[in-house]
Image: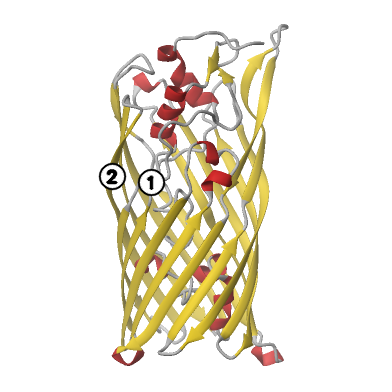
C-alpha cells in the first residue's frame, strides 16, 4: 500500500508512538546512551575512568577485561546506582499541530552492578576469571503528562551477563577477553499498534594493559557491535483486506575502541591519576547510524588514598552525536498511525522531532565525586559511594523543537575480599 500524502503537522506524534525508537533522552551518561562504567560503585566517582586501573571488579569485567588480572584472591561486589534524567521539550507546533512545553515524566532508574572474580594463581595460572551482571545501555522518555504530545512515550533497556578473564603474558603485560550475553527490551509505548518486544544479543571484548616506567599503565581495548533484532515491533501498513503489516527492526549498539592511561607516581603512590578516551562507531551501527554521528568521549579521574579512606573526583566530556538533518530511520519510509489509521511518511522534520524527544543524548560535561572506605564494619569488606551531575545542555532540532537536559546519579557498592 503506498504511503498517503499526509500533512506533517498531523503526522509526527503517531510516528513517535509507532516508530519504536528506543527512548529515554540521556539515560546513560555522556556516552551516547551506553553506560560503560559511568555508574559503577567506585569508578563512578571518577566519571567512569577505569580502562587502565579499575577501582572495582565490575569495572574490570565490563570495561577492559585485561585489568581482571589486577585482582587477587576472591572478590565479590554488589552495588546499585540511581540515575535520574531531566528532559524538557519546547515545540512550536509546526510538526505536531500544537505548540507545547513539557518535561519528561521519567522516574529514576536503578542500575545493578554485580560481579565475582577468582584469582587462578593458586593453581599455577597467572590470571583471574570473572562473571557479573549489569545494565549496558538504557534510553527512554515519557510525555504522557502533556496532552498535546498525544501520549508520547517509549523505553529501551539492555542488560548483560559478562564472563571474562585477564592473564599476565609477561612481566607488566596482560591480555584479557570477555563475552557479553545481553537481554534487550523495547516498549514502543503503543496502545493499539505496537507491543513490548525483546531479544538476546552477543558481543565480545578484547583488551591489553602494559606497565611503563614511573608507575604508569597504558591500556587498549575493543568491543564488537551488540545487535538485537526486535520482531514485529510496530505496524507499518494495512493490507487491502484490512489486516495489519508489521515490521521488524535491528538495533545495534556501536563498536568501541578505547585507550586508557593511569599513573601512581605522586605522593608515594597514594594519588592515582587516570585518563580514558573511547571512540564510538555509531555511523556503522544499524538504526542508530541514521540519527547519530560517530562520537568520541573522554574522562579524567583522580583518587587520593589516606589510611583506609579513598577520596575520588572525576570529569567526563562527550561530543554531541546527533545528526543535523537525518533523512532515514532504520530503513523505513513510513509507519501507520494506529490500527486503521493513516500511513505516515518519515520526513526529515519528523525524524528531527524524534531526535529531540526520544534520542536527545546531548550531554557534554559531567562531574563526579566519590568516597571509599576499606574494611568497613569488618575486615575484608569495603564500601564505596559516588555522586555525579551532568550539566544542563540544550539543542535546537530543525528550528521547530528545542530540548534541554540534565541529570544526576547516586550509587553505592560493597566488595567482599577473601
Q: Is residue 198 left or right of residue 320?
A: right
Q: Which of pointers 2 and 1 lies earlier in the amino acid sequence?
A: 1
Crowdedness of circle 2 by 10 Å Cα count: few (<14), some, many (20+)?
A: some
Q: Find residue 235 and report its horizontal and vertical position in percent.
A: 62, 22
Tag 2 secondary structure: strand
Residue 310 in the figure: left or right of residue 222: left
Of helix, strand and loop, which one carries label 1? loop
Mark identifier at residue 320 = 1
Q: Which mark is residue 393?
A: 2
Using the rendered view, name the quadrant where residue 187 is placed: top right
Whether residues under marks 2 and 1 lie with C-beta atoms below 8 angstroms apart, the answer is yes
**C-alpha separation, residue under disc 2 versus residue under disc 1:** 10 Å
Quadrant location, the C terminus: bottom right
Q: Residue at image x 33%, y 15%?
A: 98
Is 261 rendered above or below residue 319? below
Disc 2 or disc 1, which is closer to the eye? 1
Is residue 41 at all visible to an observer of this figure? no
Amino acid at each position: 500500500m503506498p504511503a498517503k500524502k499526509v500533512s506533517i503537522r498531523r503526522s509526527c506524534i503517531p510516528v513517535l508512538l509507532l516508530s519504536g525508537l528506543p527512548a529515554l533522552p540521556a539515560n546513560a551518561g555522556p556516552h551516547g546512551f551506553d553506560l560503560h562504567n559511568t555508574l559503577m560503585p567506585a569508578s563512578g566517582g571518577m566519571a567512569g575512568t577505569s580502562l587502565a586501573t579499575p577501582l572495582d571488579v565490575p569495572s574490570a569485567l565490563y570495561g577492559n577485561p585485561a585489568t581482571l588480572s589486577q585482582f587477587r584472591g576472591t572478590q565479590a561486589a554488589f552495588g546499585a546506582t540511581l540515575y535520574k534524567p531531566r528532559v524538557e521539550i519546547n515545540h512550536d507546533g509546526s510538526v505536531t499541530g500544537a505548540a507545547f512545553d513539557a518535561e519528561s515524566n521519567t522516574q529514576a532508574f536503578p542500575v545493578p552492578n554485580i560481579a565475582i572474580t577468582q584469582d587462578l594463581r593458586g593453581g599455577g595460572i597467572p590470571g583471574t576469571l570473572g562473571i557479573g551482571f549489569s545494565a549496558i545501555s538504557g534510553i527512554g522518555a515519557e510525555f504522557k503528562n502533556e496532552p498535546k504530545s498525544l501520549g508520547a512515550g517509549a523505553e529501551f533497556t539492555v542488560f548483560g551477563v559478562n564472563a571474562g578473564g585477564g592473564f599476565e603474558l609477561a612481566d607488566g603485560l596482560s591480555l584479557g577477553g570477555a563475552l557479553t550475553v545481553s537481554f534487550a527490551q523495547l516498549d514502543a509505548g503503543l496502545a493499539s499498534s505496537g507491543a513490548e518486544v525483546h531479544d538476546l544479543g552477543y558481543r565480545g571484548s578484547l583488551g591489553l594493559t602494559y606497565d611503563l616506567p614511573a608507575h604508569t599503565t597504558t591500556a587498549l581495548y575493543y568491543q564488537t557491535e551488540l545487535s538485537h533484532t526486535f520482531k514485529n515491533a510496530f505496524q507499518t501498513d494495512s493490507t487491502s483486506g484490512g489486516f495489519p503489516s508489521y515490521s521488524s527492526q535491528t538495533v545495534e549498539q556501536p563498536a568501541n575502541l578505547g585507550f586508557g592511561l593511569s599513573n601512581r607516581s605522586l605522593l608515594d603512590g597514594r594519588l592515582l591519576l587516570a585518563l580514558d578516551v573511547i571512540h564510538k562507531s555509531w555511523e556503522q551501527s544499524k538504526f542508530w547510524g541514521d540519527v547519530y554521528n560517530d562520537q568520541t568521549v573522554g574522562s579524567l579521574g583522580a583518587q587520593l588514598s589516606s589510611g583506609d579512606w579513598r577520596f575520588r573526583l572525576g570529569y567526563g566530556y562527550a561530543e554531541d552525536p546527533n545528526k543535523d538533518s537525518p533523512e532515514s530511520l532504520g530503513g523505513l519510509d513510513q509507519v501507520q498511525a494506529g490500527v486503521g489509521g493513516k500511513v505516515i511518511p518519515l520526513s526529515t522534520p519528523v525524524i528531527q522531532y524524534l531526535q529531540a524527544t526520544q534520542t536527545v543524548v546531548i550531554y557534554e560535561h559531567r562531574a563526579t565525586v566519590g568516597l571509599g572506605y576499606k574494611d568497613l564494619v569488618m575486615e575484608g569488606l569495603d564500601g564505596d559511594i559516588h555522586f555525579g551531575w551532568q550539566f544542563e545542555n540544550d539543542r535546537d532540532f530543525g528550528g521547530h523543537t528545542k530540548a534541554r537536559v540534565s541529570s544526576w546519579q547516586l550509587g553505592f557498592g560493597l566488595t567482599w575480599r577473601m
